Amino acid sequence: MGRPRKFDTDRAIEVASDLFWRKGYDQTSLQDLTAAMGISAPSFYFAFGSKEALFMRVVEAYRRERVIAVRQALARPTLGQALARMFEVVIEFLTDPAHPPGCMIINNSLPLDESHSFRVVLAEQREEWRLRLRDRLERAKAEGEVPPDGLESDALSRLIVSVMWGFAVEAQSGTSREALIKARDALLALLGGDHAGHNHAAPRTPEESPWRGGDSLVSTRSENT
């Protein structure tokens, strides 16, 4: 008699991730999860405790992988390179055919009401991304790459991640990778001062954006200062 097949927890979490990503937390039933994993309800509860506990494990695995990619992008030597790479990573991820389109965190955050205790956890994960970006903007100011009297890093980081989360919604709605790349280039051109009105001999790539002076939004002072 052969040995019983060992339950693969990591694989089960991948299966659950796909379901939560595609259908959302509320629309993914226990029956959906057990059927996709090929286990019984008692086995599910023994392995994960509850649907919510499983979801939190999925969220943490998702966060861990994405944070590494964003940290590496923001470590690029210049702010222009860092932001260009961050958006490149995000767009590739949002439109990767290997998984459902969009961002699993955003896909699950928008439909949730206040009855879900983990709404706070999802909000904290989004805030973690923003704070990493804010710190990178502060570093650029400290290194003289961005004028110290430019837009506040806190406000600018919120603007940029708001665009990024908008990209996630666009991708989930079917917007192509090419369209998102064009939108990214437009944003970085505005931030770097390469928008209409500049008379450059040749168009610069997002990585070459100056991030200094001129008409850059990064260097625009508030009218109240």
Image: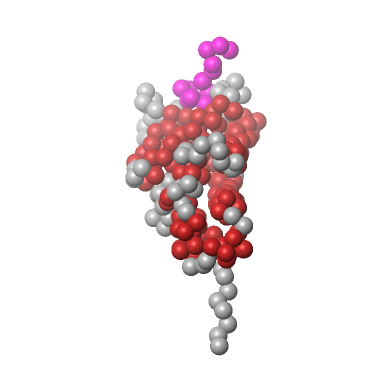
**Coloring basis for residues:** secondary structure
Q: Nearer the viewer, residue 107 or 72?
A: 107
Quadrant occupied by the N terminus: bottom right
Q: Name the residue at 46% across, 39% down.
A: 111
Q: Secondary structure of the magenta portion, mostly?
A: loop
Can you say which quadrant of the picture contains the C terminus?
A: top right
Q: Is residue 14 above or below residue 175?
A: below
Q: How many marks?
A: 0
Residue sitting at x 43%, y 55%: 99
Report whether residue 90 is seen: no
Q: Closer to the camera, 17 or 194? A: 17
Q: Is residue 193 left or right of residue 121?
A: left
Q: Does 100 sit above or below residue 209?
A: below
Q: Residue 184 magenta-drawn?
A: no
**Image-quadrant location for residue 189:** top left
Please check the rendered image and state whether residue 221 is part of the magenta-colored stretch, yes or no: yes
The single residue placed furthest to the bottom in the displayed view is: 1
Q: Nearer the viewer, residue 217 or 117?
A: 117
Residue numbers of the magenta segment: 214-225
Task: Report x, y in % for residue 132.
Answer: 61, 39
Measuring from the top left, give residue 162's x and y in whole percent: 49, 33
Q: In this view of the protein, can residue 28 be seen by the observer? A: yes
Q: Position of residue 173 (x, y in %)?
A: 36, 42
Residue farthest to the right, as pictured = 142
Name the residue: 58% across, 74% down. Answer: 6
Seen as rendered, the residue at the extreme front is: 42
Percent across and percent down for residue 221 are: 54, 18
Left or right, 222 with respect to 178, comes to right
Name which residue lies at 55% across and 76% down. Answer: 5
